[in-house]
Amino acid sequence: MSNPKVLPLIEPADGQDAVPCCPPLTERPMTADEAQVAARMFKALGDPVRLRLFSAVASHEGGEACVCDISDVGVSQPTVSHHLKKLKEAGLLTSERRGTWVYYRVEPSVLAGMGRLLTQPAAA
């Protein structure tokens, strides 16, 4: 059994505060736009290969991983690239090319927003 890791908060590159995707479900009904954003993220994580890739990046030391370290998920390299692209499009990962390799990092602010979306408020 592995110990869970707390990922460091990464400040947005443009100096702006990160905006959560949506309010908590118990706060108010979502707007159509908020529902689309949340659905895109959850849909991206709804595929087992994407969820494994996302988990591999999130659990990698420092919360970032080279594509060369996370490609062993039982599908071909082009399929891995396709799934990583979908995770990026959903706003769950960012990437940076370093030489010939691409490094992927989780977006902690987005994860925190998704967590708040599903969290029940504390009892009064």
Image (tube, grey):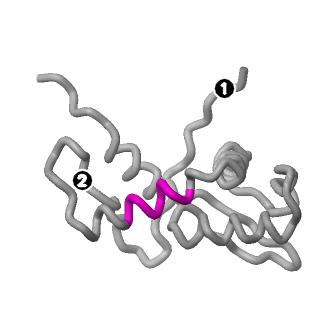
Image quarter hosting the C terminus: top left
Q: Residue at x 87, y 66 (%)?
A: 77
> Which span is picked out in magenta?
37-44
Q: Nearer the viewer, mark 2 or mark 1?
A: 2
Q: Which residue is drawn at 56% across and 38% down?
A: 6
Prevailing SS of the magenta stretch? helix
Q: Which residue is drawn at 46% across and 69% down?
A: 12
- Name above or below for residue 116 compared with residue 97: above
* 73 left or right, relative to 48: right
Image quarter hosting the N terminus: top right
Instruction: Confirm or deny contact between disc 2 and disc 1 (CB under 8 A).
Output: no
Residue 33, percent across and down? 28, 70
Give the secondary structure at mark 1.
loop
Q: Mark 1 points at which residue?
A: 3
- Amino acid type indicated by mark 2: Pro
Task: Inspect the magenta stretch and tell me whether residue 1 lies in it.
Answer: no
Q: How many labels does the image show?
A: 2
Task: Inspect the magenta stretch and tell me whether residue 42 lies in it.
Answer: yes
The label number, if any, that marks residue 39 in the structure image: none
Along the line of sight, the residue nearer the viewer: 97 or 120: 120
Where residue 81 sits, quadrant-wise, is bottom right
Of labels 2 and 1, earlier in sequence is 1
Residue 17, percent across and down? 34, 67
Q: Mark 2 points at which residue?
A: 23
- Name above or below for residue 13 compared with residue 71: below
Residue 23, percent across and down? 24, 53
- Amino acid type indicated by mark 1: Asn
Along the line of sight, the residue nearer the viewer: 7 or 42: 42
